[in-house]
Image: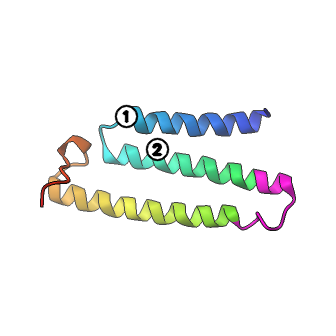
């Protein structure tokens, strides 16, 4: 395994561990998800460049588009949760509450 792919794999795993272990704030969960998406974007972009295939060259841009949509909807949820509940802590959020 090359050092670049080892670094990207370890970045994805560290972001995944941060998402599973650090569940105190909603913003930290969103940042961990964004780190996972960016490591996947860089990995797919490098893989498509190394494969020299024109059919896979559009995949990183599609993933980056979905990542931007995920980030915007996550921030909208963060603003809505902060306005209704007063903080972004995940233990204060109750999904059964109307």
What element does badge 1 sit on?
loop
The residues bearing labels 1 and 2 have C-alpha atoms spaced at a distance of 9 Å
Q: Which residues are magenta?
A: 47-58
Q: Is residue 36 above or below residue 4?
A: below
Circle 1 crowding by C-alpha within 10 Å: few under 14, some 14–19, many from 20? few
Q: Which residue is drawn at the image coordinates 47% and 48% (left, top)? A: 33
Mark count: 2
Q: Which residue is drawn at the image coordinates 18% and 50% (left, top)? A: 94
- Kindly give the residue lying farthest to the left in the view shown: 98
Quadrant placement of the C terminus: bottom left
What element does badge 2 sit on?
helix
Mark 2 lies on residue: 32
Mark 1 lies on residue: 22
Quadrant placement of the N terminus: top right
Expressed as whole percent of the image width and height from the top left, the position of residue 82 reads 22, 55
Expressed as whole percent of the image width and height from the top left, the position of residue 47 reads 77, 51
Q: Which residue is drawn at the image coordinates 46% and 44% (left, top)? A: 32
- Colour scheme in the image? rainbow
Quarter of the image holding residue 84?
A: bottom left
Quarter of the image holding residue 13?
A: top right
- Badge 1 vs badge 2, beta-carbon distance below 8 Å: yes
- Kindly give the residue lying farthest to the front in the view shown: 96
Residue 53 magenta? yes
Q: Which residue is drawn at the image coordinates 46% and 61% (left, top)? A: 70
Q: Is residue 62 above or below residue 82?
A: below
């Amino acid at each position: 395994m090359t050092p670049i792919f080892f670094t990207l794999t370890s970045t994805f795993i560290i972001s995944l561990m941060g998402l599973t272990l650090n569940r105190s704030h909603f913003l930290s969960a969103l940042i961990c998800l964004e780190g996972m998406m960016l490591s996947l974007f860089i990995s797919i972009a490098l893989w498509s460049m190394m494969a020299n295939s024109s059919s896979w060259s559009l995949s990183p841009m599609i993933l980056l588009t979905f990542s931007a949509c995920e980030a915007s909807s996550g921030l909208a949820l963060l603003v809505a949760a902060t306005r209704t509940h007063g903080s972004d802590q995940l233990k204060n959020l109750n999904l059964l509450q109307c």
